Image: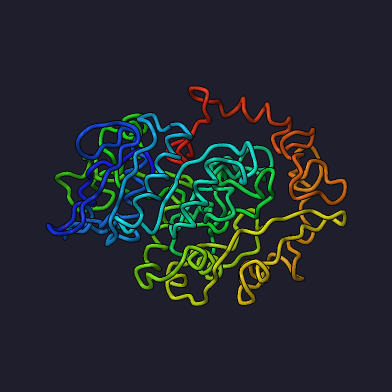
Amino acid sequence: MDTGVQLHPDFKRPIGSKPIVEVEIVGHETGLADYFGHGTHVAGILYGNGYSSSDNLSFRAFKGLAPGAQLISVRALAPDGTGYTSDVIAGIDWVVRNARGYNIRVLNLSLGHPVYESYLTDPLCRVVAAAVRKGIVVVIAAGNDGSIGTGFGTITSPGNSPYAITVGALDDKNTVSAADDVLAWYSGKGPTLLDFVVKPDLVAPGTWIVSARAVSSWLDTQHHELTLQIADYKNDPAHATQDGAYYTLSGTSMAAPMVAGAAALMLQKDPTLNPATVKARLMKSAVKDTRLVFETGAGALDVYGAVNATGSTQNSPSPQAMVGSNGFVYLQDTALLWGSSWSQGAIWGSGKGSAAGVSLTPVPSSITSGSGAIWGGGSGAKSLTENSAVTSSGAIWGGGRSSLSSTTGTIGGETAIWGGGGSYCK
């Protein structure tokens, strides 16, 4: 679900294959369209077959993770990349109603708006939960507000839903080695506001990602410096300086479809998997690191590991966290929430904590105390449902909910949905 999809050469399939389906929540015209360019790029990560970069002149091929899937484009965002919560909800409702008819198993949401209320009452989170109950794996971008203040507490809605798979972004420095990978500076960090859910669930590459270009779209015309030339991926001197079929964007919007594509491959191998098991296997198989769980979650996406992972569960909500007066952050035990085979050590790795129920020992004071604290001051243990994160002088935004609203803005009286990446992250 995004700004739509332009018919790119990498999206063409042999006669007899299932065509791209476009569902137009916004815009009503014949055929595929993407006036902003964000949706086409995301779709390329999911679905591109690399046709434009796979001939005998090409020395780099740009392929998506699941080119054998059927792509359904739910256009719910406007030509400027923004939109209305109600349109996104309508789009997810369409997906839930039509899941059986189209065999929809994975929904990618590279979008989000600030958290204004608990996931229990947030309409976006509620419809995401309904999609998961329907058997749909819902993958959501963590948001690109990680550079605001301390960065903690910047996960956007509906990525704050404990039932979704929320994905942060890595910067892999354009190298094959994982040794130099770092958390992207813009990647949203947890825990979530109000509910203190441990997010993101995992991270994936999201910086300088090459994918399908939507020709003449807003991103293509306003940020044409991001468009690759033919010489960037082909030995073709006669056309070396001409515009190619791809451009490069950064954001958690690009990381989310990496995970969504991996989920599709998992379901291709075993269609009986439920969303809870897909999430648990993705997190357990992730490459572990020593960063905070609120930065990289369970670690970095390992597609091969996820596809070949084992184990099952009927429920895998992201756990909640709270800070104690001793400065330790306590997490709900995944073994109790998901089942005994999903221990905290297996999910988070040994580098993020030690004793059962305890992680981040000790946590940075920027999370538990001071003017930017998630828990609003750090003076002792806080309730998991306390509103101090957005209402007190210790709010994550440094001034409470009013400053949060004024910096993000609204459109037409409704909460603005901002495409979770694109050119807004450099």
Relative placement, left or right, of 36 versus 304 is left
Give the quadrant of residue 194.
Answer: top right
The quadrant of the image that shows the N terminus is top left
Residue most extreme to the left:
15
* Residue appearing at x 38%, y 73% in the figure: 270
Q: How is the image coloured?
A: rainbow
Q: Position of residue 104 (x, y in %)?
A: 35, 56
Give the quadrant of residue 100.
Answer: bottom left
Q: Position of residue 126 (x, y in %)?
A: 54, 46
* Number of dots carrying numbers: 0
Residue most extreme to the top:
412
Relative placement, left or right, of 380 versus 137 is right
Relative placement, left or right, of 23 versus 342 is left
* Residue appearing at x 77%, y 57% in the figure: 329
Up-down relation of residue 95 to residue 303 (above or below): above
* Residue appearing at x 43%, y 31% in the figure: 82
Q: Position of residue 29 (x, y in %)?
A: 23, 32
Q: 206 or 341, which lies in front?
A: 341
